[in-house]
Image (spheres, rainbow, N blue to C red):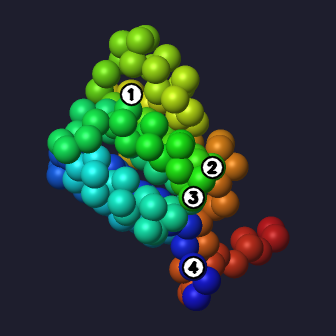
Amino acid sequence: MPESLRVLFIEDDPAIAEMYALKLDLDGYAVSVAADGESGLEMARQGQPQAIFLDIRLPQMDGFAVLEALRSDPATQTIPILMLSNYSDPDYIGRAMNLGAAAYLIKTETSPADLSKRLAELGAPAPLQPQGLETAPAPAL
């Protein structure tokens, strides 16, 4: 089976991470989760995901520092990074966008199903359907 689109989810709240990661996984994405900024940065550099969802408030290194480090590293500077935070402050949104985020999503306004839609809007390739789950066209009436 061909390789799935790799997505990194950097989130310190295990319940939030599991909720979003489960939906992405069900949609056919290969999801890795990092629980703090430093491990997220390392996983991004080593795993080269095709997209990253990044929280702001993280232990070890906050999301802004992770975003800045990813944008300054030639190996990760082109990976689309979508900020996913509870903070809706315009200053936070502006700072994230100025640092190179592809999008800024507010958790309370973003359902798990919205994440796949946002990836598609960014031009990320659609995940591949697992073999055997393809649907046949409906017969003509």
Check disc 3 and report the residue beneath it.
75
Quadrant containing the C terminus in the rendered view: bottom right
In the image, is residue 67 above or below residue 9?
A: above
Q: Closer to the camera, 117 or 134?
A: 117
Quarter of image, res 5? bottom right
Quarter of image, res 105? top left
The Cα–Cα distance between marks 1 and 3, rounded to whole angstroms, is 27 Å
Percent across and percent down for residue 46 are 44, 68
Percent across and percent down for residue 66 are 38, 42
Percent across and percent down for residue 19 are 28, 52
Of badges 1 and 3, nearer the viewer stands: 3
Which label sits on residue 106? 1
The Cα–Cα distance between marks 2 and 1, rounded to whole angstroms, is 23 Å
Camera sees residue 32: yes
The Cα–Cα distance between marks 2 and 4, rounded to whole angstroms, is 20 Å
Q: Closer to the camera, 56 or 1?
A: 56
Which label sits on residue 78? 2
Residue at the (53%, 43%) spot, across then down: 72
